[in-house]
Image (cartoon, rainbow, N blue to C red):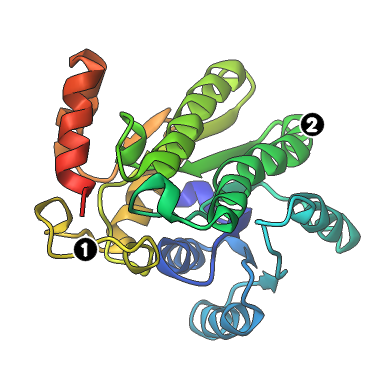
Amino acid sequence: MHYYKSKKVLITGASSGIGVSFARLLASYGAEIILTARRKDRLDQLAGKLADEFNVAVEVIPCDLSDPSGPRQLFDELVRQNLEVDILINNAGFGYNGKFEKADTETYEQMIPVNVTAPVILTRLLLPGMIARNRGGVLNVASMAGFLPIPYFSVYSATKQFVINFSWSLWHELKQTGIHVTVLCPGPVDTAFIDVAEVDRNRAAFRGLQKPGIVAEKGLRGLSRNRPMSLSRASLWVPYLLARWLPVKIGLLGGEAAMKK
């Protein structure tokens, strides 16, 4: 897509899953890429492949976004290296499937900073530069899990509802500035997220998993067109619209049926 050619794009959570697909697609579009995640070895390996295959500039900045100081440290390193970010892709995130009280407190102490705090702080730090240059974009990766509260997926669904509301609000604030904002809401995707979240792949709700490349392409296309929301498949408009009209208690029953082990 021409929209991304020669743009500097920062991708969080770039070492696996949808993050890798974002990176490969953007490299094929001619973007200059900045990869960040915790695992430097994986980032270096991916950067080498992208540079060799697509002949594009790729920078690697390892960062742990579960650390409250992580977003600021990442921003400071971007400034130190004189890297101006044209497009921010807030892709990092993880979940937990099970009874709320069964997860370690450390799980939530890491999940909320990664899923909520990091997108907000990184956007706040990088947005002024985009506005000053009269160009830029923010793509936030949420989930269909953010459409309604989901028992046994409670904290993850809450964080993704936050991301959806944050993105829509930001899109409205910035729609006269030339800055694009899109929230990408995938359904279940065939990535390691499913295993980290301890979700049973055999459950009906997780059959027909989408490939991460298809999901990433939907998000990038949505951002290029400044769509406030991009769903990874057209059929997701059904649960999205139902969530707007169904009583919450009915939605809770559906969520329980999908996620209770």
Q: Which mark is residue 132?
A: 2
Q: Please report the residue visible at 62 percent of the width from the left and 67 percent of the height from the top.
A: 37
Task: Work out whether residue 118 or residue 22 is closer to the camera in this orientation and state it.
Answer: 118
**Is label 1 or label 2 in front?**
1
Q: Position of residue 194 (x, y in %)?
A: 32, 63
Classify mark 1: residues with Cα within 10 Å, few (<14), some (14-19) or many (20+).
Answer: some
Q: Which mark is residue 93?
A: none
Give the CA separation, mark 1 to mark 2.
Answer: 46 Å
Residue furthest to the right in view is 80
Q: Please report the residue visible at 59 percent of the width from the left and 57 percent of the height from the top.
A: 106
Identify the mark nearer the N-term, 1 or 2: 2
The answer to whether one can see residue 241 in this image is: no
The answer to whether one can see residue 22 in this image is: yes
How many numbered marks, from 0 up? 2
Q: Quadrant of residue 141?
A: top left
Amino acid type of the residue that numbered disc 2 sits on in the rendered structure: Ala
Q: Please report the residue visible at 33 percent of the width from the left and 67 percent of the height from the top.
A: 191
Q: Name the residue that disc number 1 marks.
A: 200
Task: Work out whether residue 146 or residue 125 is closer to the camera in this orientation and state it.
Answer: 146
Q: Secondary structure at mark 2?
A: helix
